[in-house]
Image (cartoon, rainbow, N blue to C red):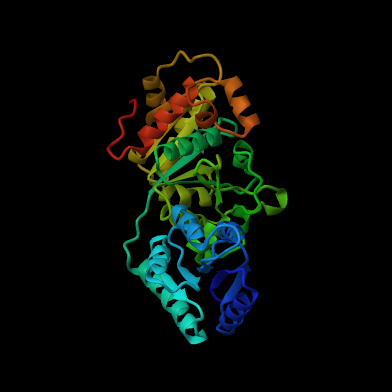
Amino acid sequence: MGRKILIVDDEPNVAYWLTYALQAEGYEVETAVTGREGLNTILAVPPDLVILDVMLPDLSGTEVCEQIRANPGTSTLPIIMLSGRTQVPDKVKGLKSGADEYITKPVETEEMLARVEALLNRTMRLSKTQAVSHGKVLGFLGVKGGVGTTTVALNVALALVKNQKKVIAAELRSYLGTVAFQLNLSPNRTLGDLLNLESEEIDDHQLSKRLIAHSSGLQVLLGPQNMAMCQEVQPNQAKAIVEGLSGMADYTIIDLAWYPSPANRAIIECCDTLVIVLEPDRASIALGQQTVQLMQEWGIGKEKTCATIVQRGEATSLALTEIASQIGCEIAGTMTRASELSLLALKQGSPLVLSHPESLAAGTLTELANRLGAEQSMAFTR
């Protein structure tokens, strides 16, 4: 099947004619009859191009166009606006709302097909010729299961969003993910869908289809939600996913599985900074030391590695400098003890930096995010 085009028009005859003509040229076509339906379709599975009527029953075409442009995940989507209004001010209004083309009705079939092909080709050329800009990739790796890696990674991601950054959080785990519970989401698409694809098939379009937008502005790629979707992440798939996501956001936050694997190695090699998550007890510190040593064996230098301490029980008698010395890497920050607030945040489906931003725990997580997100060299505790 060819590239996908969404037609948003409440005139049945126009929709039928456009669908017939486009399908005859090999395009996959989907239709919507209201602005709201069109927006929902675009956010669920973004098409390659939208043909958008100005006069719609609920939202106008210009309103739909403005919302498409305002959403980071669809801001560059090619849009052809279709209208019976032929006056110059109407055309100007449509183009100012963000449309790439403005075509007045009635339009000849050959002209429409030519405009569609030209706009798709132009978009493809621009995507190939423009310098690829990659955001910063932050990987979070727990020294063992249950240390709070997902909680730390998710709160850091949300803190960066609050700093007006475009952020994607991804659960790159072969087993069941928990971010959906922490954000109170009921996903119908997950990482599991991508793992059915070959690595060369995992492109921006396929990734965008699996991203879910949270009300905070964070976009998430969720881990599998049922056992049937669990399967091993292959190294080439992992690399394709991370590289693709990093080109779509200012920051990509990766929640890694705690055990070493070829996929984990491929992901970590793509990270700008690896954050090792541990607790301030003897077992965690010993595992942290082994993790740092493994990273060195994998060729991951100390300049790319740091740690964060999750304080669950009573305050440790060990100084951060002593822990840093024992594990062999710098300490980027800590998450202070907040058992009751953490449980409440989980129950509410709203992480600490959103539900209790004034709490000490949220403050330490925000400080960690600020350090990790700093453009200049980070001054960690040695």
Q: Position of residue 131 (x, y in %)?
A: 31, 62
Quadrant in the picture for the C terminus: top left
Q: Position of residue 313 (x, y in %)?
A: 56, 17
Q: Quadrant of residue 189?
A: bottom right
Q: How many marks?
A: 0
Residue 203 shows in this picture = no
* In the foreground, 258 or 95: 95
Tell me if residue 281 comes above or below residue 250 in the rendering.
Answer: above
Q: Residue at x 43, y 37 (%)?
A: 162
Tell me if residue 75 comes above or below residue 120 in the rendering.
Answer: above
* Residue farthest toward the left in the current orientation of the protein: 376
Q: Position of residue 275 (x, y in %)?
A: 44, 36
Quadrant in the picture for the N terminus: bottom right
* In the foreground, 83 or 304: 83
Q: Position of residue 174 (x, y in %)?
A: 61, 49
Q: Indicate left or right for 21 with 244 as reference.
A: right
* In the foreground, 294 or 274: 274
Q: Residue at x 56, y 77 (%)?
A: 27
* In the foreground, 344 or 365: 344
Tell me if residue 17 comes above or below residue 202 in the rendering.
Answer: below
Residue 94 shows in this picture = yes
Q: Indicate left or right for 4 with 296 as reference.
A: right
